Amino acid sequence: MAETEKITINMSVVDLGKIDLLVEEGFYSNRTDFIRAAIRQQLNQHGEAVQQSVTRKSMVLGILSYDRADLEKLAQRGDRVSIRVLGMLTIADDVSPELARQTIESIKVLGTFKVNKAVQQAIADRVK
């Protein structure tokens, strides 16, 4: 399983009680199991809409990583990249703030963005 992120939700006490009842009756092993199943069901139900949106917006679906070598290739060609990710974007620790500013035009991440603080500060104005 890919890396997970923790989320917090607020629920009514009645809805939470219903989840607890389903857990007690053995339908789910715990609250988290129920919530994951419910989220997966909704994502599956809207899967086509998500895929169409990803395609329309030219987004990467999944995990995208850039390291120094990737960005140096762009810099050598004089290119810049606009990054769109639905999932997770990582920029490796070997990327300098200067290289990131030189090669990254813009970033939009729906999900998780992992980058060191120096690079994050250098490209803060490019993250949407």
Image: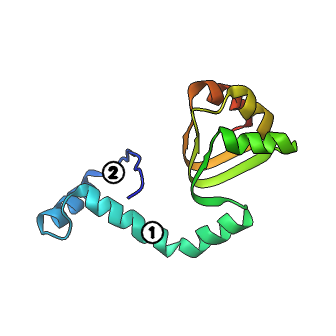
In the picture shown, does residue 91 fall above or below 48?
above
Q: Residues within 10 Å of mark 1 (few under 14, many from 20)?
A: few
Q: Where is residue 17 in the image (x, y as percent from the top left)?
A: 20, 57
The residue identified by callout 2 is: 11
Q: How crowded is mark 2: few (under 14 residues within 10 Å), some or many (20 or more)?
A: few
Write the residue at 41% across / 67% down: 40
Q: Which quadrant of the figure has residue 75?
A: top right
Q: Which quadrant of the figure has residue 104?
A: top right
Write the residue at 57% across / 26% down: 117
Amino acid identity at mark 1: Gln
Q: Where is residue 63 in the image (x, y as percent from the top left)?
A: 55, 54
Which mark is drawn over residue 112? none
Dot 2 lies on which element?
loop
Which mark is drawn over residue 42? 1
Q: Position of residue 90 (x, y in %)?
A: 57, 43
Amino acid identity at mark 2: Met
- How far separated are the C-alphas under marks 1 and 2? 17 Å
**The C terminus is located in which quarter?**
top right
Q: Is residue 105 visible?
A: no
| Mark 1 / mark 2, whichever is N-terminal | 2
